[in-house]
Amino acid sequence: MAMLFLVAGLLCILKPISFAQEGSVFFSYSGSTGPDGWGSLSPDYATCSSGSSQSPINIVNGEAVINSNLNALDIQFRDSVSATLVNNGFNVLMRFDGDAGELVFGGKNFALKQMHWHSSSEHQVDGTQYAGEIHLVHNAADSSVAVVSVLLQSGQSDPIIAKVQQQLDELPNKQSNESPPEIALGNVNIQELSGLTTTDKYYTYTGSLTTPPCTEGVTWIVIEKIGSISNDQVEALKRPMDDGSKTNARPGQAMNGRSVEAYQA
């Protein structure tokens, strides 16, 4: 019996930070289930209101501290990975079912697990909110999480969305109390992400997941270079989502004494 409790305890310790999934308490981006009320929807979501290191934030460029110990971003993407398009109701994501790529940051290796989109952007730079934002979610062997963020302005098409435009248009709406709809994409080449993440400057800070349970301890890397997304693609991302989550950007959160560091080539 003692061994049973020991194993259970270890599993709890090793359990990775995760995003809200099927079976979680419903939340949205408007009304009583919107961001201002997330912390009261469930005890599991309490950190959304009580946390002191929440995301997203407004990055003030003039206050970001250049850290000479930071290195150029070391991030790789595969040219063929099995992927699945998922409609969570509060976002659309691409889940990778194999080796999609790797981020090396702070002496630690992080494996790319999924990417998803927000519109409008969640992070702002000097108070500017963009048309959209990509989150590239990585996990390390010790279950820590690093998210690479790419801000998107209105303009040319996002290359990854363009690859799966047909499947995105076919993605069903999520029905209440049902599993998130999925469409298998087969093998996808995500090398175009290299063009979005190759940069002479990025910002980094410690924050949280931007959706419930708003778990803290997440390493954020926000690319200074701005990508682009077409208006049609923004509308395509909004179409399958819940009515209260068509615009799925959490408002900016208080810094609470945190600092933002920057790498500059």
Image: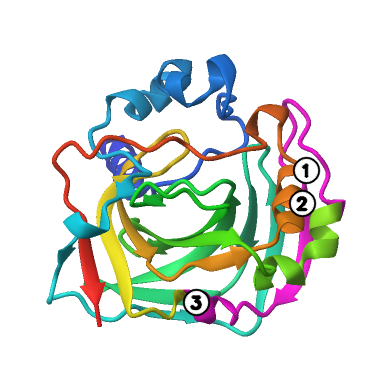
Residue shown at 57% from the left, 82% from the top: 78
In whole angstroms, how far apart are the C-alphas of marks 1 and 2? 5 Å
Q: From the viewer's perspective, is 263 left or right of 115?
A: left
Nearer to us in this view, 154 or 70: 154
Could you tell me the amino acid type at mark 1? Arg
Q: CA distance from mark 3 to mark 1?
A: 29 Å
Q: Which residue is mark 1?
A: 239
Nearer-N-terminus badge (3/2):
3
Rendered position, 177 above or below 173: above
Q: Is residue 96 among what the camera can see?
A: no
What residue sits 46% from the left and 46% below the top? 122
Horizontal relation, residue 95 to residue 256: left or right:
right
**What element does badge 1 sit on?**
loop
* Disc ID at residue 221: none
Q: Is residue 110 covered in magenta?
A: no
Image quadrant occupied by the N terminus? top left
Residue 129: give x, y in percent of width and height.
47, 48
Mark 3 and mark 1 lie on one chain; the one further toward the N terminus is 3
Location of residue 219 (image quadrant): bottom left
Q: Which mark is residue 236?
A: 2
Q: Is residue 186 magenta?
A: yes
> Which residue is disc 3 drawn over?
101
User: Which quadrant holds residue 255?
Assistant: top left
Q: How many numbered discs?
A: 3
Q: Secondary structure at mark 3?
A: strand
Give, as a single range, the part of the protein colored magenta.
Answer: 170-196
**CA neighbours of label 1 inside 10 A, class few (<14), some (14 to 19), many (20+):** some
Q: Which numbered disc, 3 or 2, marks the residue closer to the eye?
A: 2
Q: Nearer the viewer, residue 127 or 59?
A: 127
